[in-house]
Image (cartoon, helix red, strand yellow):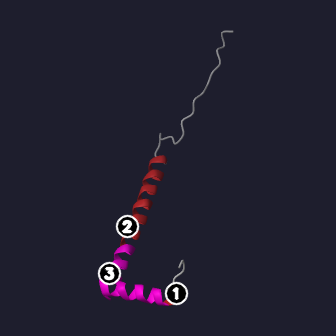
Amino acid sequence: MGSFSLWHWIIVLAIVLLLFGRGKIPELMGDVAKGIKSFKKGISDEDEQDTASSTTPGATTAKTVDHKADETK
């Protein structure tokens, strides 16, 4: 009951083809590919903005706190 045979997959494929048609599946895959490409482009643009802001003069990426002990003792 847990595993599917070859016949099960053929029936599922036939139902998917009947529902979406032969031309619709490549369109869907093309849309998925475009979405992935735009996501990667957005991530790389964000990384470029982060590196550009960290290389500007006067910008610090990490703040440090200097602790000075009281010298009045």
Of the two numbered discs 2 and 3 on the same chain, state the one appearing first in sequence. 3
Q: Which residues are magenta?
A: 7-33
- Please name the amino acid that badge 2 sits on: Ser
Residue 61's place in the image compared with 32, above or below, is: above
Q: Residues within 10 Å of mark 1 (few under 14, many from 20)?
A: few
The main secondary structure of the magenta stretch is: helix
Where the C terminus falls, by quadrant? top right
Q: Nearer the viewer, mark 1 or mark 2?
A: 1
Percent across and percent down for residue 54 are 48, 47
Q: Nearer the viewer, residue 11 or 36?
A: 11
Q: Distance from label 2 to label 3 (Cα)?
A: 17 Å
- Please name the amino acid that badge 3 sits on: Glu
Residue behind mark 1: 5
Q: Is residue 34 left or right of residue 7?
A: left
Percent across and percent down for residue 5 are 52, 87
Which residue is located at x 37 percent, y 69 percent? Answer: 35
Which residue is located at x 46 percent, y 86 percent? Answer: 9
Percent across and percent down for residue 12 are 41, 84
Q: Nearer the viewer, residue 3 or 39?
A: 3
Please say whether residue 21 is one of the residues in the magenta stretch: yes
Residue behind mark 3: 27
Which residue is located at x 42 percent, y 53 percent? Answer: 49
Which residue is located at x 51 percent, y 40 percent? Answer: 60
| Mark 3 touches mark 1? (CB < 8 Å) | no
Residue behind mark 2: 38
Rendered image quadrant of residue 45: bottom left
Q: Which mark is residue 48?
A: none
